[in-house]
Image (cartoon, helix red, strand yellow):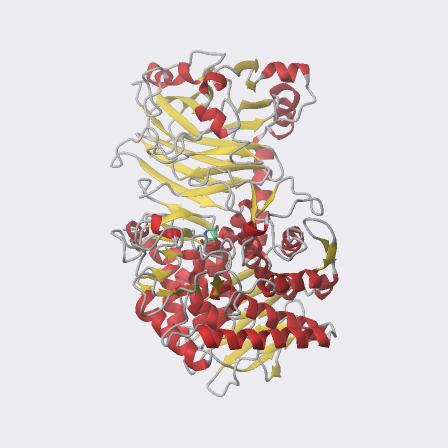
Amino acid sequence: MKYGYFDDDKAEYVITRPDTPTSWSNYLGSTVYGAVITNNAGGYGFYKSGAQGRFMRLRFNAVPMDQPGRYFYLRDQEDGDFWSASWQPVGKPLDQYKSECRHGTAYTTITSEYKGIKSETKYYVPLGQNFEYWRLKVTNTSDKVRKIRVFSYCEFSNQWNTTQDQVNLQYSLFIVKGEKVGDNLLRYSIQDNLYIQHPEYEVGGAYMSEWVALIGTPMTGFDTSREAFIGTYGSYEHPKAVVDGACTNSEAFGDNSCGTVQGDLELQPGETKEIMLMLGIDDALAVGQKIVNEFGTFKRADEEFEKLVNNWHAKLGSFKAITPDEDINHTVNVWGLYNCLITFAWSRAASLVYNGERDGLGYRDSVQDILGVSAAIPEEAEERLVRMISGQCQNGGAVPVISKDFNAGHEKAPKPEEFRSDDCEWFFNAVPCYVAESGNFDFYNKVVPYADGGEATVYGHLKRALEFNLERMGADGLPCGLLADWNDCLKLGYHGESLFVAFQLRLGLTTYADISERLGKKDEAAWALKERDTLDANIQKKCWDGKWFIWAVGEDGTVYGTQTIEEGQIYFNTQVWAVMSSAATAEQARICMESVKEKLATPYGLMLCAPPFVKTRSDIMSSVVFLPGIKENAGIFNHTQGWGVIAETMLGNGDRAYEYCKASIPAAYNDKAEIRQSEPYVVGQTTYSTFSKRPGNTRTSWLSGAGTWSYYAITQYMLGIKPQYDGLLIDPCIKHDWDGFTVERRWRKMNLHIEVKNPQHICKGIEYIEVDGKRIDAAVIPVSELKDGSKIVAYMGKDAKSSPVERV
Ligand code: NOJ
């Protein structure tokens, strides 16, 4: 079933049926003033923190999942009939009510048509501002004069801390005030006396406040009291004031507040009128009025919209592809990257599922997020990378979360048993990716503090990351699993051993050796390669189970992930990382990836393990708490799907890489959205697998490592455009029947036009490349051969030499 389509030219997803299987959401604003908005205008707003700065309320995990939100009610004053400008909350019958929602880059537009009245609502937060616009155009498409009364509605939190707001009612119901302070201006304050005593207080601390202004028509009424507007026995569907036909001009004094202004539009046949609501945080008179004075015209609102769109579209311009596959095009050209950028901004903070408690950057996820955004925003990627590296402690492990007030050099290191084993090994993916993207090789010499004091160059930090694991080896010479590795649920005991981390470490040692060579540090390179040899020997001695690599070794010596164990026999991560780290022999790589196909591949993606855990003790495998076939318990954990694609491309299996890619990318489900249920334009953390009762259903949209790895796998491995330190590698691995594809790639401030031709219909192998007409018999184009506007034609062919570079 189809609920919408992609409009890539406008970088929008268009929802044509509002009754989507779940609420399909989008983000507005920035990490300072942020908002979640759905296709039915549900959602919330927050200042700096989803949980601590929640100024606009969402009733979490309610039915529907997105209410309340940013609503306009339209009321026909002739007959009293009313509806909302988004289908919900009034929810008129869909045979009479037409609606279209366009989710764009940090804006959402919803149009509706009902009984001869068309409306268009556009929501956005101007760049760098702490307020939002709700613009409303109303058109009379009937042949008689229409009198339409408009009411806005949102629900402000009583306390910006969500727990206080929703649970501690004996306090939070007695601190809120709403008042009219100007012809078209409403003021909301929480703990107002504190502001009166201390007007210098920063908003969002002890003092919280919002304002609402109506532009373009006189405010003919208002309600700031939720109880007055909705009524004791009313609802969002039937708010009392709208049913009655007029606001009551209520000034909230305790209980709950709401943002309701009332305006009246008289429309001739064919006539359109536009009004807009501005809503922001901070004091209405001291701040709001000034913002209204400066930004409160339609002209200014148009300019701000244009700036916003240009800013986002410029980022999306870093990589554009035309391939024979439309789903891949939607993913690469708009939604994959937009998803990466939103995830980079918000980490795992705020969505319809994340309430915002995790205020800060979860370590491993945020390091990986760099991979998806380095091309689009290299400066911000560098800044983030430095911050993440400064979260490494002197012992080489990392603090689990970089909080907002994190103070590098002055933090307390976690207790020994609190370290994760994988955290800093992600450097070996993220740092070379950023350096190759930017060309800033000197980054390795940049001095960065450790979280708990002292400092080192980035290169020094990389060495400490390796040493952290090398100094914590288990009985079989594999890295200890510590509190957990990437898999939060794996409880091996501190000295249990993680093969996944062994593969990360192997990749790290290889990468470190390469960097050392380039820095002229031959001894260091030799050290790393010697350590790698020892590790390889240990891996081969203990970890090959005949058809696949084992999962891990428990502290008591139990080996997990073997053909003879009943549950969790085969684990996905150790197969793909055996290939990605080049630890597997060619034969092992072939066999283990065949096992993946046979045991873990489903039409909806690759399962994390199989069979699921039912009887295994939860102190060893805590994913047993999840229902079989979901999340870490044999679910399809989407974070890992890109690894499957990368591993297959490294083996040259373009057809299989394509198959895995298509099984997992959201766009491929656009025509069967009822299977996935979540937004077909963004990733979800987890998909129910065939071990479950609901295969294909996907949950926890937007904020997941799935975004980064799927985008990175497609752009750098499948399409194969991969920056190197001193050149650009073009080494695709595609479906054999593709004739080729084109890419517009921004790299080191150059715009490059790349065409890949595949006349012999092979999956992988570049014979030669022409750069502005000059032939290069290699897959890497030296940076000196490139200039802004260079035209590159890469020819795939059977006579290609094997791929020169396999850095993940
Ligand atoms: C979710 C976490 O955000 C991520 O860091 C972790 O790797 C996965 N869970 C797998 O357990």
Quarter of image, res 374: bottom right
In terms of depth relative to the viewer, which is nearer, 241 or 110?
241
In the image, farthest residue toward the bottom: 799
In the image, farthest residue toward the front: 556
Give the answer, above or below, for where 505 lies relative to 696: below
Give the answer, above or below, for where 179 lies relative to 781: above
In terms of depth relative to the viewer, which is nearer, 365 or 116?
365
Quarter of image, res 434: bottom right
Whether residue 618 is visible here, answered yes or no, is: yes
Q: Position of residue 350 (x, y in %)?
A: 49, 40
Question: Is residue 795 left or right of 684 when viewed as pictured?
Answer: right
Name the residue located 60 percent from the left edge and 77 percent from the top edge: 780
Question: Is residue 12 left or right of 404 when viewed as pictured?
Answer: left
In terms of depth relative to the viewer, which is nearer, 761 or 605?
605
Name the residue located 58 percent from the left edge and 51 percent from the top edge: 416
User: How many numbered discs?
Assistant: 0
Q: Position of residue 647 (x, y in %)?
A: 45, 70
Q: Position of residue 191 (x, y in %)?
A: 57, 17
Name the residue located 35 percent from the left edge and 16 percent from the top edge: 240
Question: Is residue 92 left or right of 363 when viewed as pictured?
Answer: left
Quarter of image, res 246: top left
Whether residue 741 is visible here, answered yes or no, is: no
Question: Is residue 169 left or right of 806 when viewed as pictured?
Answer: left
Image quadrant in which the C terminus is located: bottom right
Q: Position of residue 807 (x, y in %)?
A: 56, 71
In terms of depth relative to the viewer, which is nearer, 748 or 442?
442
Give the answer, above or below, for where 77 lies relative to 447: above
